[in-house]
Amino acid sequence: MNIIIIGAGQIGLHLARSLSGAAHDIIVIESNEKLAESSSSEIDGRVITGSGTSVELLLEAGVAESDLLFALTSSDSTNLIACKLAKELGTKKTICRVSPLLLREEWMFDYRSNFSLDHIFSSERLSAIEISKYIRNPEGIAIQEIARGRIEIQQIRIPENSNACGKSLLELNLPERVRVASIQRAERSFVPTAEEKIESNDQVTLFGDPSRLSKTATSLRSNTEKEKGANVVILGGGEYGLSLAQMISPWNCQIRIFEKNQDHAETLAEELAGKATVIHADAASLNELREEQVGIADFFIATTQSDEDNVMTCLQAKNLGTKSCIPLIHRTDYANAVNQAKSQLGIKEVISPREVVRRELMRFITSDKYHIVKKIPAGEIIETTIREKSKVAGKTVSEISLPAGSIFVALIKGIHAKVPSATDVIEVGDTVFSIVSEEAKKSFLKLVAK
């Protein structure tokens, strides 16, 4: 593929390194001369010095013949404009990095359509999603967001004492727009019918609105209507910490956030009123951790910009009795080193934002007609944008005869996303997420992804 990367910062350079050596033609555009010069010796590709919003530079980079453009600078405006220009100049696909604030505004303005974006993401939110997997799903099977964060996928294992055991999907009375999309039972994975009964140890894949899905998952896992949420302490009230707190607050978690900047702590307290307790204190101090009884927490998550502070406070929290500690490590070499020693250090998991983003972006290095979002026991979750030649365009879901082993699980129309019903019409420009088995993949793509 012909790939253009705008921005040779931490994220852009890490992606370029990952693609080096593969059968791709890579061109990186970086505005900082020193960074451009140092990057050129680290990647297998060409580095051009200049702005990614320059039409002349984009044309020099071969944007008209490019298959994929990643806009990965730290500037929202640069990334949005670069993607818009690139699409107008002929690139096939654009992937845009934005701040969490802009992502939170997406329900008010359709950035995707107005700036010709094929995918939009925030590195802070992706990292928060990764951390939340360990908090919101104790078994850590899988949690992922799709459809711009408005639809969540969660895989849970049904325990023996669950009230769901022995009941059919119809009898479970699942909330509207929540769907059991697949079940793995022993060695068999399948898309269930409404009459299928849940059995203990089933691994169930759920799709739905995050707030409704949280209650459904808790109900399926438990033999009681209510389940006590985790006690979570977050170090750092920046975008990583804020995104995480907002993400887990619907799950009945008891959340405390340490923020040492007083003004920011006050702003954070207003934004998270009723969802989290914000503590103005320096959690790098052992006395502060003791005073706030961090030792009783189920999780201590360190999300500051300092790798050293994140690791050391996790060690202190663990020594005080916290059950699970997870540090955010920004430098890849540090992340690798701490990850290798995590069992000795008593750290549950190490989260590297660069690596989380790299994994997210690598899934677009496939086809211009579809993307593989995730592999699950029943097959793959595939994202497809409906084109004019698609055989499903203009039809309702009930009118579409999908191959056995495939099912629509999420639908994006403009800025709106939902789990589709039988009466929803699939139109040109819509984005559809589906579960597709290996056996059904060829027929499904022929039908949907023309």
Image (cartoon, rainbow, N blue to C red):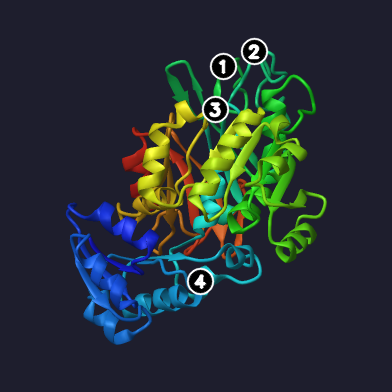
Residue 211 in the image: state x and y as whole percent.
71, 44
Residue 113: assigned label: 4
Give the label, 4 or 3, closer to the camera.
4
Element carrying mark 3: loop
Dot 4 falls on a residue whose secondary structure is helix
The disc, 4 or 2, on the residue closer to the chain's N-terminal end is 4
Q: Can residue 425 be seen in this snapshot?
A: no
Residue 158 horizontal/vertical position (percent): 61, 21
Q: Which amino acid does label 2 sit on?
A: Glu
Q: Which residue in the protein does label 2 denote?
A: 160
Q: Earlier in the sequence, mark 1 or mark 2?
A: 2
Residue at screen point 49% across, 35% down:
349
Look at mark 3 in the image and give the residue it sits on. Answer: 192
The image shows residue 291 at horizontal and vertical percentages of: 77, 39
Q: Distance between the residues labelled 1 and 4?
A: 43 Å
Residue 201: assigned label = 1
Image-quadrant location for residue 326: top right
